[in-house]
Image: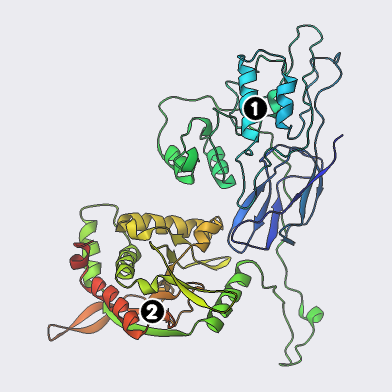
Amino acid sequence: MSETRVFLLPDLGEGLTEAELVSWHVAVGDTISVDQPIAEVETAKSTVEVPSPYAGIVAELHGQPGETLDVGKPLISVTPVSVGGPAGADAAAPAEPETEPDETELGDALDEPADTPAKAQAEAYREEEKAGSGNVLIGYGTPGGHGVARRTRARKASSAGSVSTLPLEDGAADGGAAPDADVDLSLLRTRVPGKLGAVISPLVRRMAREHGVDLGALPGSGEGGLIMRRDVEAAISTPEVEERPTAAPRPAAAPAPVAAPAEPRSSDVQGVDARTGLPISARTPVKGVRKVVATNMARSRSEIPEATVWVDVDATGLMELREGLKSGSDQVPGLLAFIARFVTAGLKKYPELNTRIETAEDGSQEIVSFGGVNLGIAAQTDRGLVVPSVRAAEKLTARELDAEIRRLTDVARQGKATPTELGSGTFTLNNYGVFGVDGSAAIINHPEVAILGVGRIIDKPWVVNGELAVRKVTELTLTFDHRVCDGGTAAGFLRFVADAIENPTTLLADL
């Protein structure tokens, strides 16, 4: 039996230092494969599945659901399973796969000519191992070229000279046929060269698995052929012409223990509050998203000398434009998408509000400007307030913005937004009108320097061409960092957006 390997909780992105263990997908004694999801954890950014970089038998689970684990601390211990057996072993007995063979060993184990399919596949696998499997979670990767050297010689058949092999995972096998070679190729990982493209995100792999998408036949649109979420979504929405054989389903993993909801401790246990004299009904730990929001908002208030300007806006013209579009198309962008389009145009004219202040160790400061806009959209979720961002929003039309805003809001509420989606914004748009309020002195989403809020749209008396009329009116509120610009710039930007809402056709004609 090989030495037990301990997998440490990786950095899940954005320098996060801890994560809450939501549930285990495996149990002690289970046999797992490389890149198999073993646990679901919730960080301050999102909820993600953690895949295992090792194959073998689960020896120990380091933590209970509901427990907060530190990055770099043990998550799971895996005992690799030895490969092969004596030369005279019964060929019908299944081979036990070894974890992570060294790339120099596969070549030694092959006695086939160089032009056989098994030899070529093993050689390709050996080359891949030099760079790692490519199946990684944010912040860590499966090892490449530095695994423990282990020999993986195949068992000799007692009669026919063939060897029993295990099928490859995730549709990697060609029709389930075993390679005609004297080597156990069950060691190959989920990503087989020439069969399955590079997939980094466990969420992408799970989405493909749930919808029956064959990743082996899917071209990746990302850098170096990387299969992205959009590639899988496109494959899901496109009906298949031919019915492809699907790989045999994996055995269902043992049900993961579900964390029981935390129950407030009773007042007799908590006692009486000394300051108020009232019984204490519960104590709720500040953690996860709530902890990060609290820290971020406190830092924003303490570091940023903010100021706020606001203006009432007649949104009747925008409402009428949208109603007119409805008559000619079923896909009409929401009001927030139009306002987002006006915001990106305004930031192009007033780029000071699309910046960040960086402070060096010696105390000196710089204003960092950007060549694009990652527009954050504040979204209220069950886990707290999060701000996923539309990347390169200035390049998108109102319809494209509408689709991306809806997608981001949905994944954020499911707790599945990635750290990149949640931590890359340069300016935030906050639609608090959905809560039925007119305005808010919002807190800037540090390290950004401004946030624009939109209140509810209601009927109000308004003077139009000297006549009193009932119009659809909303309030825009801009909170900005006074270090990066003065009131004139902030007011100019706010007035630009307000004018665009009041006269949308004029601005949209120029966009």
> Callout 1 environment at 10 Å: few (<14), some (14 to 19), or many (20+)?
many
Image x and y of residue 119, in percent = 64, 19
Dot 2: element: strand
Residue with the mark numbered 2: 478
Q: Is residue 274 above or below residue 448?
A: below
State left or right for residue 255 relative to residue 434. Answer: right
Q: Are marks 1 and 2 in contact (CB under 8 Å)?
A: no
Q: Residue at x 60, y 30 (%)?
A: 192
Q: Is residue 256 above or below residue 275?
A: above
Residue with the mark numbered 1: 168
Rendering quarter of residue 110: top right
State left or right for residue 467 relative to residue 206. Answer: left
Residue type indicated by callout 1: Leu
Image x and y of residue 317, in percent = 21, 70
Image x and y of residue 499, in percent = 24, 75
Q: Residue at x 55, y 55 (%)?
A: 416
Residue type indicated by callout 2: Leu
Image x and y of residue 335, in percent = 32, 65
Task: Quarter of the image for the C terminus: give it.
Answer: bottom left
> Callout 2 environment at 10 Å: few (<14), some (14 to 19), or many (20+)?
many
Give the mark count.
Answer: 2
N-term-proximal mark, 1 vs 2: 1
Q: How is the image coloured?
A: rainbow
State left or right for residue 293 relative to residue 185. Answer: left
